[in-house]
Image: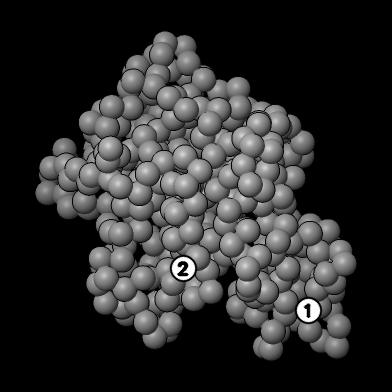
């Protein structure tokens, strides 16, 4: 049976067709009211954006979902988990400050913020899943205990996963630091030519595995835990994963974590993808590169695999933007070409969808319902 994915494009010619209005309407048209009972504590899973990033979901759209949840008797709170790397969101205090500075203050979004894995990312619950890589996964406590969850995801590229959407938001976003490390543990980055010794990777390595040797960054693999965050943090693209079969295991581990987060909320979880500002890298980088394609719109579904498959397909149907990382890649500018494979040729983003369907996270077979 096909999963329903509801879709609004970006066009607007009056106030009632503004994107903010569409966010509120898609909530109702997709039937999200059905997962909210009176007095439910409703987690709105969001990425607040790293300090310096500007591509994350705009707080005014989050406010629309907050107000919808309240209108149906729910008690919403915004939430995310702390990062493994030493950025502006590695503990709950810095995370809250960053969220507020990025526009997610109560006065704007009309809901409190709770960092779901606690002050130092120590608060989690073991969830049994019995899959290939994990028997159990660690899910942040306050996500586990919430009565319902709405996952709001910015769909964009990712240097390890190929792309990031609803599935990645479930997997990395609902795990404490220890769970993030479990997912990344097969990744062992290496430093290539062109290192400028800026030391961004050294400052952000959570275990001190990186040092300067002969004027270049050096990663000690006997210390490295494989979190992969130095790959994200290298603004010159010098640090790369050691590509190979282990990257399949990384994707599969990530999907199993997504399954764990989904399973504890099954029947009480819904997804909204914002396919706009489709940047080459994730919102964990302290900068945002130019979007690679025109803004597409917003999608809503109860199925995380279907909504990511639809988002992936819609992005790949676009012409690429000139003057972006996509044009520099030399491939992917035409409709039908895989934008994410062009940006990150060694990644296997499609494996997110294939393995997700295989283990029962959702279906790739969807019906796209375009709303007017």
Q: Secondary structure at mark 1?
A: strand
Q: Quadrant of residue 22?
A: top left
Of labels 1 and 2, earlier in sequence is: 1
- Say which residue appears at 72% left-offset and 57% top-offset: 185
The mark found on residue 321 in the picture is none
**Res. 303 in view:** yes
Residue 200: % across, % down: 72, 70
Q: Is residue 110 visible?
A: no
| Residue linked to disc 1 | 217
Residue 183 to residue 30: above or below: below
Q: Is residue 191 left or right of residue 251?
A: right
Above or below for 20 versus 210: above
Tag 2 secondary structure: loop
Q: Nearer the viewer, residue 316 or 229?
A: 316
Res 326 quadrant in image: bottom left
Residue at point 59%, 39% (across, down): 174
State which quarter of the image contains the N terminus: top left
Q: 144 left or right of 282?
A: right
Which residue corresponds to the image point at 37% horizontal and 82% vertical from the top-left? 331
Which label sits on residue 280?
2
**Viewer-nearest residue: 316 or 235:** 316
Q: Position of residue 201 (x, y in %)?
A: 73, 69
Which residue does the image show at 63% across and 68% down from the upper left?
245
Image coordinates for residue 151, horizontal then vertical, percent: 45, 38
Front residue of 229 and 204: 229
Q: Residues within 10 Å of mark 1 (few under 14, many from 20)?
A: many
């Amino acid at each position: 049976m096909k999963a329903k994915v509801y879709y609004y494009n970006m066009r607007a010619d009056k106030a009632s067709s503004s994107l903010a209005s569409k966010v509120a309407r898609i909530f109702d048209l997709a039937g999200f009211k059905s997962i909210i009972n009176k007095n439910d504590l409703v987690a709105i899973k969001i990425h607040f954006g790293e300090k310096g990033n500007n591509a994350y979901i705009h707080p005014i759209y989050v406010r629309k979902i907050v107000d919808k949840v309240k209108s149906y008797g729910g008690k919403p709170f915004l939430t995310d988990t702390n990062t493994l790397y030493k950025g502006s969101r590695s503990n709950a205090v810095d995370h809250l400050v960053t969220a507020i500075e990025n526009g997610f203050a109560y006065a704007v979004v009309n809901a409190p913020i709770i960092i779901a894995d606690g002050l130092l990312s120590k608060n989690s619950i073991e969830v049994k899943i019995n899959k290939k890589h994990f028997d159990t996964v660690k899910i942040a406590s306050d996500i586990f205990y919430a009565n319902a969850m709405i996952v709001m995801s910015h769909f964009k590229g990712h240097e390890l996963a190929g792309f990031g959407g609803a599935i990645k938001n479930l997997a990395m976003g609902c795990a404490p630091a220890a769970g993030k490390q479990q997912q990344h543990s097969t990744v062992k980055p290496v430093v290539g030519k062109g290192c400028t010794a800026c030391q961004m990777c050294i400052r952000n390595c959570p275990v001190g595995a990186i040092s300067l040797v002969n004027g270049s960054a050096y990663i000690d693999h006997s210390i490295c835990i494989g979190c992969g965050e130095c790959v994200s943090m290298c603004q010159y693209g010098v640090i790369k994963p050691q590509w190979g079969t282990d990257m399949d295991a990384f994707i599969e581990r990530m999907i199993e974590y997504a399954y764990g987060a989904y399973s504890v909320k099954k029947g009480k979880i819904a997804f909204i993808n914002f396919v706009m500002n489709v940047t080459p890298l994730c919102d964990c980088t302290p900068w945002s590169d130019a979007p690679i394609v025109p803004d597409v719109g917003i999608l809503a579904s109860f199925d995380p695999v279907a909504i990511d498959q639809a988002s992936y397909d819609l992005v790949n149907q676009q012409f690429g933007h000139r003057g972006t990382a996509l044009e520099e890649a030399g491939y992917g500018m035409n409709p039908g070409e895989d934008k994410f494979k062009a940006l990150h040729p060694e990644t296997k983003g499609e494996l997110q969808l294939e393995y997700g369907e295989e283990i029962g996270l959702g279906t790739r077979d969807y019906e796209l319902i375009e709303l007017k």
